[in-house]
Amino acid sequence: MTDTLPDQQSVGADVFRQALAVHASGVVVITAQSDGIPVGLTATSFSSVSLEPPLVSFYVDQSSTTWPWLRGADHFAVNILASDQAELAARFARKGVDRFAAPTNWRAGPLGAPLLADVSAHLICLPYETVEVGDHVLVVGLVAEAATHNTGRPLLYHQGRFGRFLPHQENL
Ligand SMILES: Cc1cc2nc3c(=O)[nH]c(=O)nc-3n(C[C@H](O)[C@H](O)[C@H](O)COP(=O)(O)O)c2cc1C
């Protein structure tokens, strides 16, 4: 695969963003404890990677101020948000606020990484691989623990807005 294309062969930024905006995604908050401090950020780039071994991934912007803290942690948690957690998602994307202060409801997980309350599921991951890709870093985690709490509707992100999943009535 080509690493970089000459400028004239790359899509324009606005056209690229418009096309990506029609792709609906689930929403997670990645959390960790680094030097005893809870850190976390909202991400839609979460994906499953491998079943054996059990791997998941997300991409983090190299300019993220949370990333150096996440990188320093010995494990991280993926909190998969439920449909009524849009405000929580917005909070974990906001700069200049204590993302873990009330009304955020959380507890320390078994290894220390914060687990957010009322999420659909959480995964506890050990660092497996990081790869710099363009202006982001691909972070792959080995899933050490997984717990599903709520199989109800997921929080989705589409066209710059949070929303809910509405299943078709008929079974396809
Ligand atoms: C819906 C949504 C999805 C996001 N997805 C990602 C993502 O996948 N990767 C990422 O690095 N930042 C993502 N962000 C931005 C981060 O949540 C956060 O705003 C950014 O990391 C800046 O904060 P920081 O400097 O504390 O890291 C997303 C933001 C929103 C609102």
Image (spheres, rainbow, N blue to C red):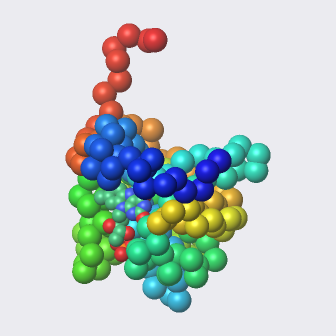
- Where is residue 42? Give x, y as percent: 38, 61
- Where is residue 46? Give x, y as percent: 49, 52
Asked whether residue 125 appears in the rendered view, the answer is no
Above or below, 11 relative to 166: below
Above or below, 91 relative to 25: below
- Where is residue 145? Give x, y as percent: 64, 57
Look at 64% across and 77% down and name the residue there.
74
Look at 52% across and 76% down and name the residue there.
70
From the viewer's perspective, is 53 left or right of 97? Answer: right
Asked whether residue 87 appears in the rendered view, the answer is yes
Above or below, 23 relative to 107: above
- Where is residue 23? Give x, y as percent: 37, 38
In the foreground, 4 or 156: 4
In the foreground, 7 or 158: 7
Query: Ligand 1 is located in which of the four quadrants?
Result: bottom left
From the viewer's perspective, is 51 left or right of 8? Answer: right
The mark tally for this picture is 0
Look at 65% across and 47% down and name the residue there.
1
Look at 23% across and 47% down and name the residue there.
161
Above or below, 1 relative to 89: above
